[in-house]
Image: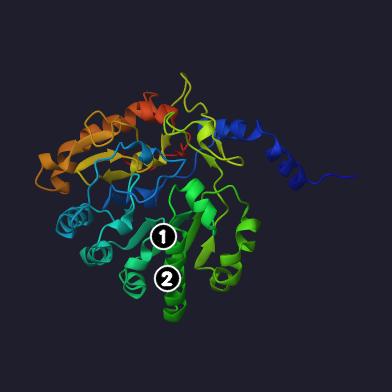
Amino acid sequence: MKIMPKTIGKRLKAIPLFLPARRLARNLFFPFPAPHSRKAMALIEISSVCNAKCIFCNYRFGHRTKLLLPKEKFQRIAGACVAKGFQNLSLTSVGGENTLNPEFIDIIATAKAVGFKYIVTHTNGILLHRHNPGKLLTSGVDEIGISFPGFESGLFSTIFGTNGFDDFKKSIQGLLTEHARLNSSVRIIFDPRTTLTRKALLESEFCREFVQRFLNDRVIIQEPTQVFDSRSGAIKPHDLLPGMRLRHVTIKSLPFKKTFLCEKMFALSVLCNGNVRFCGCVFDASIDTENDPLYIDSLKNFKDFGDFLDHNIEKIHRIRTDFQNGILPSLCRKCTLYIPVSTKGIEL
Protein backbone atom coordinates (compact mmCIF):
# COMPACT_ATOMS: atom_id res chain seq x y z
CA MET A 1 0.00 0.00 0.00
CA LYS A 2 1.35 3.41 -0.99
CA ILE A 3 1.67 5.86 1.93
CA MET A 4 0.99 9.46 1.00
CA PRO A 5 3.24 12.27 2.32
CA LYS A 6 0.42 13.74 4.45
CA THR A 7 -0.06 10.36 6.13
CA ILE A 8 3.67 10.17 6.86
CA GLY A 9 3.52 13.63 8.42
CA LYS A 10 0.64 12.64 10.67
CA ARG A 11 2.47 9.50 11.77
CA LEU A 12 5.62 11.46 12.56
CA LYS A 13 3.64 13.96 14.63
CA ALA A 14 2.26 11.06 16.66
CA ILE A 15 5.80 10.06 17.73
CA PRO A 16 6.49 11.75 21.13
CA LEU A 17 10.04 12.77 20.22
CA PHE A 18 9.12 14.24 16.85
CA LEU A 19 7.51 17.48 18.04
CA PRO A 20 10.45 18.50 20.31
CA ALA A 21 12.82 17.76 17.42
CA ARG A 22 10.72 19.84 15.07
CA ARG A 23 10.64 22.73 17.58
CA LEU A 24 14.42 22.44 17.99
CA ALA A 25 14.93 22.81 14.24
CA ARG A 26 12.52 25.74 14.14
CA ASN A 27 14.21 27.43 17.12
CA LEU A 28 17.65 27.25 15.60
CA PHE A 29 17.14 27.57 11.85
CA PHE A 30 13.59 28.37 10.74
CA PRO A 31 12.16 31.48 12.44
CA PHE A 32 8.79 33.00 11.70
CA PRO A 33 8.64 36.18 9.58
CA ALA A 34 9.34 39.53 11.22
CA PRO A 35 6.41 40.48 13.49
CA HIS A 36 5.58 43.88 12.03
CA SER A 37 2.15 44.02 13.67
CA ARG A 38 3.52 42.77 17.00
CA LYS A 39 6.01 45.63 17.11
CA ALA A 40 3.07 48.03 17.26
CA MET A 41 1.25 46.06 19.99
CA ALA A 42 0.98 47.48 23.50
CA LEU A 43 0.01 45.20 26.40
CA ILE A 44 -1.69 46.95 29.31
CA GLU A 45 -2.87 45.08 32.38
CA ILE A 46 -6.11 46.31 33.97
CA SER A 47 -6.43 43.58 36.62
CA SER A 48 -3.86 41.53 38.49
CA VAL A 49 -6.64 39.70 40.37
CA CYS A 50 -8.15 36.43 39.18
CA ASN A 51 -11.31 34.52 40.12
CA ALA A 52 -9.90 31.13 39.10
CA LYS A 53 -7.07 28.91 40.28
CA CYS A 54 -6.19 27.02 37.12
CA ILE A 55 -4.06 23.93 37.63
CA PHE A 56 -1.74 24.97 34.76
CA CYS A 57 -1.15 28.55 36.02
CA ASN A 58 1.11 29.77 38.82
CA TYR A 59 -1.26 32.63 39.76
CA ARG A 60 -2.69 30.25 42.38
CA PHE A 61 0.59 30.41 44.31
CA GLY A 62 -0.13 34.02 45.29
CA HIS A 63 2.75 35.78 43.48
CA ARG A 64 0.69 38.76 42.27
CA THR A 65 -0.06 42.00 44.09
CA LYS A 66 -3.84 42.28 43.70
CA LEU A 67 -4.68 45.55 41.94
CA LEU A 68 -7.20 47.02 39.50
CA LEU A 69 -6.09 49.75 37.10
CA PRO A 70 -8.39 52.83 37.23
CA LYS A 71 -9.70 54.19 33.92
CA GLU A 72 -8.03 57.59 34.42
CA LYS A 73 -4.61 55.98 34.84
CA PHE A 74 -5.24 53.68 31.90
CA GLN A 75 -6.13 56.68 29.72
CA ARG A 76 -2.80 58.38 30.45
CA ILE A 77 -0.82 55.23 29.66
CA ALA A 78 -2.84 54.39 26.55
CA GLY A 79 -2.64 57.93 25.17
CA ALA A 80 1.14 57.98 25.57
CA CYS A 81 1.40 54.56 23.85
CA VAL A 82 -0.54 55.82 20.83
CA ALA A 83 1.59 58.98 20.73
CA LYS A 84 4.67 56.74 20.53
CA GLY A 85 3.32 54.84 17.52
CA PHE A 86 1.59 51.83 19.12
CA GLN A 87 -1.44 51.03 16.98
CA ASN A 88 -2.74 47.81 18.53
CA LEU A 89 -3.69 47.01 22.13
CA SER A 90 -3.92 43.75 24.01
CA LEU A 91 -5.62 44.00 27.39
CA THR A 92 -3.47 41.20 28.73
CA SER A 93 -3.39 40.39 32.42
CA VAL A 94 -0.36 38.44 33.59
CA GLY A 95 -2.39 35.93 35.58
CA GLY A 96 -5.37 38.24 36.18
CA GLU A 97 -8.98 38.47 34.97
CA ASN A 98 -10.10 41.62 33.12
CA THR A 99 -13.80 41.38 33.95
CA LEU A 100 -13.06 41.86 37.67
CA ASN A 101 -12.34 45.50 36.80
CA PRO A 102 -15.73 47.28 37.05
CA GLU A 103 -14.56 49.79 34.41
CA PHE A 104 -13.74 47.01 31.92
CA ILE A 105 -16.00 48.27 29.09
CA ASP A 106 -15.24 51.96 29.70
CA ILE A 107 -11.53 51.15 29.48
CA ILE A 108 -11.99 49.52 26.07
CA ALA A 109 -13.99 52.52 24.86
CA THR A 110 -11.25 54.81 26.16
CA ALA A 111 -8.62 52.80 24.27
CA LYS A 112 -10.54 53.24 21.03
CA ALA A 113 -11.07 56.97 21.74
CA VAL A 114 -7.33 57.65 22.23
CA GLY A 115 -6.55 56.07 18.87
CA PHE A 116 -5.84 52.33 19.08
CA LYS A 117 -6.81 50.71 15.78
CA TYR A 118 -7.14 47.09 16.93
CA ILE A 119 -8.08 46.00 20.47
CA VAL A 120 -7.92 42.47 21.86
CA THR A 121 -9.12 41.43 25.31
CA HIS A 122 -8.97 38.13 27.17
CA THR A 123 -11.24 36.61 29.80
CA ASN A 124 -12.26 33.31 31.36
CA GLY A 125 -15.85 34.35 30.69
CA ILE A 126 -17.16 33.61 34.18
CA LEU A 127 -18.10 37.18 35.06
CA LEU A 128 -18.86 38.54 31.60
CA HIS A 129 -22.56 38.55 32.51
CA ARG A 130 -21.85 41.39 34.97
CA HIS A 131 -21.06 43.62 31.98
CA ASN A 132 -23.60 44.63 29.34
CA PRO A 133 -22.84 42.44 26.27
CA GLY A 134 -24.25 45.02 23.83
CA LYS A 135 -22.03 47.75 25.26
CA LEU A 136 -19.04 45.41 25.19
CA LEU A 137 -19.56 44.47 21.54
CA THR A 138 -19.94 48.14 20.53
CA SER A 139 -17.16 49.47 22.79
CA GLY A 140 -14.48 49.31 20.10
CA VAL A 141 -13.14 45.85 20.93
CA ASP A 142 -12.15 43.81 17.87
CA GLU A 143 -11.42 40.41 19.40
CA ILE A 144 -12.50 38.64 22.59
CA GLY A 145 -10.49 35.59 23.61
CA ILE A 146 -12.24 33.26 26.06
CA SER A 147 -10.08 30.77 27.92
CA PHE A 148 -12.19 27.95 29.34
CA PRO A 149 -11.84 24.27 30.39
CA GLY A 150 -14.88 22.93 28.55
CA PHE A 151 -18.64 23.27 28.46
CA GLU A 152 -19.13 21.13 31.59
CA SER A 153 -19.44 21.98 35.28
CA GLY A 154 -16.99 19.33 36.48
CA LEU A 155 -14.17 20.67 34.31
CA PHE A 156 -14.48 24.13 35.85
CA SER A 157 -13.90 22.73 39.33
CA THR A 158 -11.12 20.28 38.41
CA ILE A 159 -9.18 22.45 35.92
CA PHE A 160 -10.09 26.05 36.76
CA GLY A 161 -10.49 25.49 40.51
CA THR A 162 -13.84 27.27 40.63
CA ASN A 163 -17.52 26.39 40.62
CA GLY A 164 -18.12 29.05 38.00
CA PHE A 165 -19.78 27.05 35.23
CA ASP A 166 -23.29 28.41 35.81
CA ASP A 167 -21.94 31.98 35.62
CA PHE A 168 -19.90 31.07 32.53
CA LYS A 169 -22.97 29.56 30.87
CA LYS A 170 -25.01 32.69 31.62
CA SER A 171 -22.22 34.89 30.25
CA ILE A 172 -21.87 32.94 27.00
CA GLN A 173 -25.62 32.84 26.43
CA GLY A 174 -25.84 36.62 26.79
CA LEU A 175 -22.73 37.35 24.71
CA LEU A 176 -23.54 35.07 21.77
CA THR A 177 -27.20 36.06 21.66
CA GLU A 178 -26.28 39.76 21.53
CA HIS A 179 -23.48 39.10 19.03
CA ALA A 180 -25.99 37.50 16.66
CA ARG A 181 -28.63 40.20 17.25
CA LEU A 182 -26.15 42.95 16.39
CA ASN A 183 -24.60 40.94 13.54
CA SER A 184 -21.38 42.00 15.21
CA SER A 185 -18.03 41.89 13.43
CA VAL A 186 -16.20 41.30 16.75
CA ARG A 187 -14.28 38.02 16.69
CA ILE A 188 -15.05 35.70 19.62
CA ILE A 189 -12.41 33.00 19.99
CA PHE A 190 -12.98 30.16 22.45
CA ASP A 191 -9.58 28.91 23.64
CA PRO A 192 -10.08 25.55 25.41
CA ARG A 193 -7.54 24.48 28.05
CA THR A 194 -8.79 20.99 28.70
CA THR A 195 -8.43 17.22 28.58
CA LEU A 196 -11.14 16.99 25.91
CA THR A 197 -10.75 16.77 22.15
CA ARG A 198 -12.43 19.39 19.99
CA LYS A 199 -14.94 16.74 18.88
CA ALA A 200 -15.85 16.01 22.52
CA LEU A 201 -16.22 19.75 23.20
CA LEU A 202 -18.62 20.13 20.27
CA GLU A 203 -20.65 17.15 21.46
CA SER A 204 -21.03 18.38 25.05
CA GLU A 205 -24.61 19.26 26.00
CA PHE A 206 -24.32 23.06 26.34
CA CYS A 207 -22.30 23.36 23.15
CA ARG A 208 -24.60 21.08 21.19
CA GLU A 209 -27.83 22.71 22.42
CA PHE A 210 -26.74 26.35 22.41
CA VAL A 211 -23.22 27.32 21.29
CA GLN A 212 -23.05 25.44 17.98
CA ARG A 213 -25.78 27.49 16.30
CA PHE A 214 -23.62 30.62 16.65
CA LEU A 215 -20.37 29.19 15.27
CA ASN A 216 -19.16 30.88 12.08
CA ASP A 217 -16.08 32.69 10.79
CA ARG A 218 -16.40 35.23 13.64
CA VAL A 219 -17.24 32.83 16.48
CA ILE A 220 -14.61 30.10 16.63
CA ILE A 221 -13.68 27.22 18.91
CA GLN A 222 -9.94 26.58 18.58
CA GLU A 223 -8.19 23.26 18.90
CA PRO A 224 -7.78 22.50 22.63
CA THR A 225 -4.54 23.28 24.43
CA GLN A 226 -3.42 20.13 26.26
CA VAL A 227 0.32 20.79 26.48
CA PHE A 228 1.45 23.50 28.91
CA ASP A 229 4.46 25.52 29.98
CA SER A 230 5.78 24.67 33.46
CA ARG A 231 6.02 28.37 34.47
CA SER A 232 9.73 28.02 35.23
CA GLY A 233 9.21 24.71 36.99
CA ALA A 234 6.37 25.89 39.25
CA ILE A 235 3.86 23.56 37.55
CA LYS A 236 4.63 19.87 37.99
CA PRO A 237 3.33 16.91 35.95
CA HIS A 238 1.24 15.74 38.90
CA ASP A 239 -0.59 19.10 38.93
CA LEU A 240 -2.21 18.25 35.60
CA LEU A 241 -4.96 15.79 34.74
CA PRO A 242 -4.56 12.70 32.53
CA GLY A 243 -4.60 13.89 28.94
CA MET A 244 -2.64 17.05 29.85
CA ARG A 245 1.15 17.29 29.95
CA LEU A 246 4.02 19.72 30.22
CA ARG A 247 5.93 20.82 27.13
CA HIS A 248 9.62 19.94 26.88
CA VAL A 249 12.12 22.80 27.01
CA THR A 250 14.10 22.85 23.78
CA ILE A 251 17.41 24.52 22.96
CA LYS A 252 17.04 28.10 21.74
CA SER A 253 20.66 29.04 21.02
CA LEU A 254 24.02 27.70 19.89
CA PRO A 255 27.47 29.19 20.62
CA PHE A 256 28.39 29.72 16.95
CA LYS A 257 25.28 31.53 15.70
CA LYS A 258 22.91 34.36 16.52
CA THR A 259 19.85 33.49 18.56
CA PHE A 260 16.54 34.43 17.01
CA LEU A 261 14.67 36.95 19.11
CA CYS A 262 11.46 35.68 20.71
CA GLU A 263 8.32 37.38 19.40
CA LYS A 264 7.38 38.23 22.99
CA MET A 265 10.51 40.36 23.31
CA PHE A 266 8.74 42.86 21.05
CA ALA A 267 5.85 43.10 23.53
CA LEU A 268 6.11 45.64 26.35
CA SER A 269 3.67 44.87 29.17
CA VAL A 270 2.53 47.59 31.57
CA LEU A 271 1.47 45.96 34.85
CA CYS A 272 -1.14 47.33 37.24
CA ASN A 273 1.54 48.49 39.68
CA GLY A 274 3.28 50.54 36.96
CA ASN A 275 6.13 48.14 36.26
CA VAL A 276 6.98 47.64 32.59
CA ARG A 277 8.40 44.29 31.44
CA PHE A 278 8.89 42.23 28.33
CA CYS A 279 6.30 39.52 27.60
CA GLY A 280 2.76 39.12 28.90
CA CYS A 281 2.92 35.36 29.42
CA VAL A 282 5.51 33.95 31.77
CA PHE A 283 6.27 35.06 35.32
CA ASP A 284 7.55 33.71 38.63
CA ALA A 285 7.56 34.81 42.29
CA SER A 286 9.58 37.92 41.40
CA ILE A 287 6.73 39.44 39.37
CA ASP A 288 5.77 42.94 40.55
CA THR A 289 9.34 43.54 41.75
CA GLU A 290 12.54 44.88 40.23
CA ASN A 291 13.98 41.35 40.47
CA ASP A 292 11.66 40.15 37.71
CA PRO A 293 14.10 38.89 34.99
CA LEU A 294 11.96 40.64 32.37
CA TYR A 295 11.61 43.93 34.29
CA ILE A 296 12.63 47.09 32.45
CA ASP A 297 11.61 50.00 34.70
CA SER A 298 8.63 51.49 36.51
CA LEU A 299 6.33 54.20 35.18
CA LYS A 300 6.42 55.68 38.68
CA ASN A 301 9.87 57.02 37.81
CA PHE A 302 8.60 58.99 34.79
CA LYS A 303 5.94 61.52 33.88
CA ASP A 304 4.34 59.17 31.32
CA PHE A 305 4.92 56.12 29.11
CA GLY A 306 6.53 58.25 26.42
CA ASP A 307 9.09 59.56 28.89
CA PHE A 308 9.69 55.97 30.03
CA LEU A 309 10.41 54.88 26.44
CA ASP A 310 12.73 57.80 25.75
CA HIS A 311 14.74 57.03 28.87
CA ASN A 312 14.84 53.23 28.45
CA ILE A 313 15.21 52.80 24.69
CA GLU A 314 18.92 51.92 24.98
CA LYS A 315 18.23 49.42 27.79
CA ILE A 316 15.48 47.76 25.73
CA HIS A 317 17.83 47.58 22.73
CA ARG A 318 20.61 46.11 24.90
CA ILE A 319 18.38 43.37 26.38
CA ARG A 320 17.17 42.38 22.90
CA THR A 321 20.72 42.38 21.55
CA ASP A 322 21.92 40.28 24.51
CA PHE A 323 19.13 37.81 23.72
CA GLN A 324 20.38 37.54 20.14
CA ASN A 325 23.88 36.92 21.49
CA GLY A 326 22.61 34.00 23.55
CA ILE A 327 22.34 35.86 26.88
CA LEU A 328 18.74 35.05 27.75
CA PRO A 329 16.82 36.20 30.84
CA SER A 330 16.41 33.28 33.25
CA LEU A 331 12.66 33.05 32.61
CA CYS A 332 13.32 32.78 28.87
CA ARG A 333 15.84 29.98 29.29
CA LYS A 334 13.20 27.83 30.99
CA CYS A 335 10.24 28.92 28.84
CA THR A 336 8.64 26.55 26.31
CA LEU A 337 6.52 29.27 24.67
CA TYR A 338 9.47 30.58 22.64
CA ILE A 339 8.44 31.91 19.22
CA PRO A 340 11.61 32.61 17.18
CA VAL A 341 11.26 35.41 14.66
CA SER A 342 13.41 36.92 12.00
CA THR A 343 14.33 40.53 12.76
CA LYS A 344 15.31 41.31 9.18
CA GLY A 345 14.14 44.83 8.38
CA ILE A 346 13.16 45.60 11.99
CA GLU A 347 14.86 48.11 14.22
CA LEU A 348 15.46 46.62 17.67
- The amino acid at mark 2 is Leu
Residue 70 sits in quarter: bottom left
Return the residue found at the far top.
Answer: 255
Image point (22%, 48%), residue name: 67
**Spot occupied by residue 106 in the image (x, y as percentages of width and height):** 24, 66
| Residue, far right | 1
* Display coloring: rainbow
Q: SS class of the residue under badge 2?
A: helix
Q: In terms of depth relative to the viewer, which is nearer, 19 or 63?
A: 63
Q: Quadrant of the C terminus?
A: top left
In which quadrant of the rendered view does residue 187 lie? bottom left
Q: Residue at x 51, y 26 (%)?
A: 251
Label 2 neighbourhood size at 10 Å, few (<14), some (14-19), many (20+)? many
- Closest to the observer, 120 or 224: 224
Residue position for label 2 = 175
Q: Position of residue 242 (x, y in %)?
A: 61, 40
Can residue 304 be spotted in the picture? yes
Q: Count neighbours of disc 1 (C-alpha within 10 A) and say few if under 14, some if 14 to 19, many if 20 or more.
A: many
Residue identified by numbered label 1:
125
Q: Nearer the viewer, residue 148 or 262?
A: 148
Image quadrant in which the N terminus is located: top right
Which residue occupies 37% across, 67% down? 129
Q: Amino acid at mark 1?
A: Gly
Q: Is residue 185 visible?
A: no
| Residue 18 percent across, percent down from the top left | 66, 33
The reply to whether callout 2 and callout 1 are in contact (CB within 8 Å) is: yes
